[in-house]
Image (cartoon, rainbow, N blue to C red):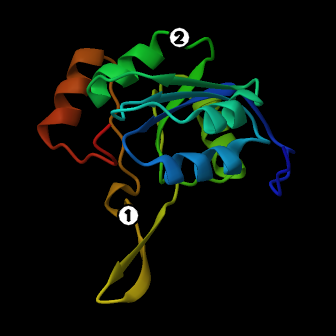
Amino acid sequence: GYSMIRNEIDLSELTLIIHTFERKDFLLRQIAYLSAWKVNIEIVDGSKLPLDDLSVEYVNQFPNINYLHLALPVLDRIVDAAKRMRTPFVMCLADDDLFLQGGLAAAIDSLKRNEDAVACMGQAAGFDSLYGKYYAFEYGNNLSGYEVTGDCPQQRIQFAFSNWRPATWY
């Protein structure tokens, strides 16, 4: 398949878990965007019906993409995909999220440099429409500089959940 996305950054240490439900167009756009990347992709589709044969044929041409139709709740689908992880880094990605290769590479580099860290989040922008007008906004800026540190994992978890500020629900 043809892709306009340049394939320069090696993200082979990363697996993207893409969860989707009844949004074939979003999913196919996501696959087209990521198809040339050097990244592992697990798609868990909870739609009532799986992708049609032509779409599955399209997805199957990419050896780094694994598509599974699982009529399960989204958290069960994510857990199922996580069981197949063979890479040191993993990230959930919604079917309508678009990330830049450089940002993901920087996140992996940051996690490698700080072995105490278990997660990180970069800069994000959101796009939406209201009353027929489109706008962009900073997304996740309330998490700027946010970190949970300490020697005891139980205390870090307790602190993190005592004043919960999720970047995304998953």
> Element type at marker 2?
loop
Q: Residue at x 17, y 34 (%)?
A: 161
Q: Amino acid at mark 1?
A: Asn
- Give the left or right position of residue 118, taking residue 52 as reference: left
Q: Residue at x 86, y 50 (%)?
A: 2
Q: Residue at x 66, y 53 (%)?
A: 100
Q: Residue at x 82, y 52 (%)?
A: 3
Residue 71 picture location, percent across and down:
32, 23
Query: Cα distance, mark 2 to mark 1?
Result: 32 Å
Residue 136 picture location, percent across and down:
45, 78
Q: Nearer the viewer, residue 49 or 87?
A: 49
Place residue 40 in its image quadrant: top right
Which mark is first along the chain, 1 or 2? 2
Quarter in which the N terminus is drawn: top right
Q: Which mark is residue 80?
A: none
Q: Nearer the viewer, mark 2 or mark 1?
A: 2
Q: Amino acid at mark 2?
A: Arg
Q: Residue at label 1?
A: 141
Q: Which mark is residue 84?
A: 2
